[in-house]
Image (cartoon, coloured by chain):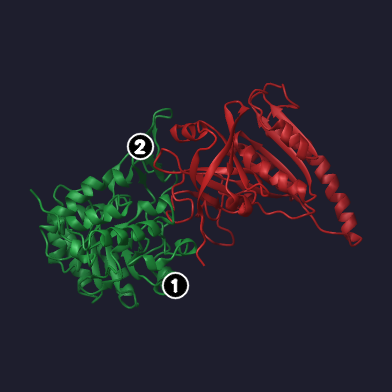
Chain colours: A green, B red
């Protein structure tokens, strides 16, 4: 029997599969349809200090092999999240990672102070959401800001901290090293790529927000390249994501350097998708004679 | 207890309805058994995302469900080109259902692809013994679809066209206005009966089609105190409430702020008075 457990710095996962923030809500909808023990963890919808209603629709545009989203961080705010959603999430058989977003460093600190007092084992700092004007985008694109936010949050909690990076930056390894220097326990990458879709009949963008984040298989080559670069740039674990829809994709990301992976857009193709990915991963590892999933990490041999 | 919502459905029939619209009949006993009027299915095709379509009708004995539509883009074109025997991956039934009871007087007002979900409701309501009336609007008689079906199942059925080549010249709302007096008379009679201890039942207007039409239908019946439900649509991804892209704006009541609701989860059916009309 293949051992799927993954050891991270301050937290262990039963398996390397994490539900990506923004694609799984707080787990309430998904648990109607599938067995949440198939996940190692669920990363919550991004939480901000104040409730946010999000962007006006349309919030989605289909692309070849992917989609653009401009949801705009619709969430109930940290107080409502902790009171109304977190207790239920903590009852799940998989771990809970609280994804935190903000516009100012103070926002991250305020939210994380409150989350630090809860039983949630991990926090994921969303420094890379592309849909908030003047907000997160500036953090993720500036390595000094990445280090500063990470350091601030590191100072107020002993919980596992993942720093989620944007690919919309010239050199993602700089941001990764900055997060490591700031005390991050892991780097999660990549968030969505900034993109646009156009309706040529109305001569307007399809998204009401004009631009949005590209996700799905379309981004996988970019994500794999960045995971590989960051793996060679930092010592801390990497949580890889970007277009994973099959077990083979999971393997590829782990070979590139990921200790665990996040699966997001695939959940939108079917709430049962995780069942197939989980079973296929076990079958693949078994077929290849792997005793553990963890042994895949960093197995890629570059030419 | 985890609920299975993904199935493989086999296409049984693909028929032209007129006006470029087609009707697809699928074999899928699980969806046929569970589906209620107002709900939709999300069909996988060559495009990345699924295509959501309102359920037009079911045959629970045979395990069939039907959906209809026009080839607006590549995804719909691919679906509407399928040949009988094709296997399609489908999520369903999704979304919420129209709210109605035996003994109600159901008025359906629609246009465009909105007529499909209304057909399912009329079918069930008529079978349950409800009084039913239908007002549907099309550009001209070429575009009019399912006329024979609706005229057979509804007690009163008015088809309207701008061209004046159907029952009523004008829009769906012109036809709706003609149906209201009879409904009002039924309500007066009902109230008299109820005073004498007879059963309940109210007039319900359900509407599905272009936004301005639905808004107009609500404006017509709101002053009369008639319950009105609308079926909204918005570009969608997951169809089950995970991703928050398919939201529609809703009015906040009782001091609550205006907010967004998910078309696939809190909807697609919404009380008309909750909708924050654009």
Q: Residue A266's x, y, as percent?
A: 37, 52
Does the CB distance between marks 2 and 1 fall below 8 Å?
A: no
- Kindly identify the residue that appears in the image at 66 percent across and 37 percent down: B110
Graded by Cα atoms within 10 Å as few (under 14), some (14 to 19) or many (20 or more), the crowding at tag 2 reads: some
Q: Quadrant of the N terminus of chain A?
A: bottom left
Q: Are marks 2 and 1 on the same chain?
A: yes
- Kindly identify the residue that appears in the image at 22 percent across and 67 percent down: A291
Disc 1: host chain: A
Which residue, given by chain and number where applicable, does mark 1 sit on? A88
Q: Residue furthest left?
A: A303
Mark nearer the N terminus (2 vs 1) = 1
Q: How many marks?
A: 2
Residues B197 and A137: in front is B197
Residue A125: mark in rendering:
none
Residues A34 and B156: in front is A34
Which residue, given by chain and number where applicable, does mark 2 sit on? A197
Disc 2: host chain: A
Q: Residue B257's x, y, as percent?
A: 51, 58
**Image: B153 above or below A293:** above
User: Is A41 situated left or right of B254 in this image?
Assistant: left
Write down the quadrant of residue B150 in the picture: top right
**Image: B49 above or below B158:** below
Kind of element beneath mark 2: loop
Graded by Cα atoms within 10 Å as few (under 14), some (14 to 19) or many (20 or more), the crowding at tag 1 reads: few
């Amino acid at each position: 029997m293949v051992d799927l457990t993954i050891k991270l710095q301050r937290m262990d996962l039963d398996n390397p599969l994490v539900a990506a923030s923004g694609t799984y809500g707080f787990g309430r909808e998904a648990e109607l349809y599938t067995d949440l023990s198939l996940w190692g963890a669920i990363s919550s919808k991004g939480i901000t200090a104040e409730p946010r209603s999000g962007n006006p629709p349309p919030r989605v545009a289909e692309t070849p092999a992917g989609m653009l989203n401009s949801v705009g961080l619709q969430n109930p705010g940290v107080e409502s999240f902790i009171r109304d959603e977190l207790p239920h999430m903590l009852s799940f058989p998989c771990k809970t990672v609280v994804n935190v977003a903000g516009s100012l460093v103070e926002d991250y600190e305020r939210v994380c102070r409150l989350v630090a007092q809860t039983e949630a084992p991990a926090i994921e700092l969303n420094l890379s959401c592309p849909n908030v004007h003047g907000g997160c985008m500036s953090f993720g694109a500036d390595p000094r800001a990445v280090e500063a936010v990470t350091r601030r949050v590191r100072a107020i909690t002993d919980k596992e901290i993942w720093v989620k990076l944007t690919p919309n930056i010239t050199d993602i390894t700089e941001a990764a090293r900055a997060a490591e220097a700031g005390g991050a326990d892991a780097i999660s990458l990549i968030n969505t790529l900034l993109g646009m879709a156009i309706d040529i009949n109305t001569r307007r963008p399809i998204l009401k927000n004009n631009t949005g984040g590209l996700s799905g298989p379309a981004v996988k080559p970019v994500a794999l390249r960045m995971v590989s670069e960051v793996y060679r740039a930092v010592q801390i674990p990497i949580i890889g994501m970007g277009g994973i829809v099959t077990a083979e994709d999971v393997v590829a990301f782990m070979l590139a350097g990921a200790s665990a992976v996040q699966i997001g857009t695939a959940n939108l193709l079917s709430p049962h998708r995780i069942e197939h990915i989980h079973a296929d991963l076990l079958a693949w590892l078994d077929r290849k004679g792997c005793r553990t999933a963890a042994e895949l990490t960093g197995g890629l041999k570059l030419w | 207890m985890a609920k299975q919502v993904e199935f493989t459905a086999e296409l049984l029939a693909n028929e032209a309805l007129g006006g470029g619209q087609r009707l697809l009949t699928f074999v899928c006993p699980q969806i046929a058994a569970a589906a209620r009027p107002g709900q939709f299915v999300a069909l996988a095709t060559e495009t990345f995302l699924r295509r959501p379509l309102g359920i037009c009708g079911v045959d629970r004995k045979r395990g069939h469900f039907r959906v209809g539509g026009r080839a607006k883009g590549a995804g719909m074109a691919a679906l509407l080109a399928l040949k009988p025997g094709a296997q399609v991956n489908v999520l369903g039934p999704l979304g919420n259902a129209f709210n109605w009871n035996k003994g109600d007087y159901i008025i359906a007002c629609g246009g465009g692809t909105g007529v499909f979900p209304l057909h399912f409701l009329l079918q069930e309501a008529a079978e349950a013994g409800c009084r039913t009336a239908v007002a549907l609007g099309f550009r001209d008689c070429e575009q009019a679809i399912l006329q024979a079906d609706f005229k057979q199942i509804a007690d009163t059925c008015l088809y309207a066209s701008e061209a004046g080549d159907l029952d009523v010249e004008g829009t769906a709302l012109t036809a709706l206005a003609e149906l209201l007096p009879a409904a009002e008379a039924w309500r007066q009679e009902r109230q008299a009966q109820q005073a004498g201890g007879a059963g309940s039942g109210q007039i319900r207007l359900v509407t599905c089609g272009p936004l301005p039409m639905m808004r107009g239908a609500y404006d017509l019946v709101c002053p009369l105190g008639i319950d009105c439900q609308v079926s909204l649509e918005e570009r969608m991804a997951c169809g089950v409430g995970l991703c928050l892209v398919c939201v529609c704006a809703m009015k906040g009541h009782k001091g609550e702020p205006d907010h967004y609701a998910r078309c696939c989860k809190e909807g697609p059916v919404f009380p008309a008075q909750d909708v924050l009309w654009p």
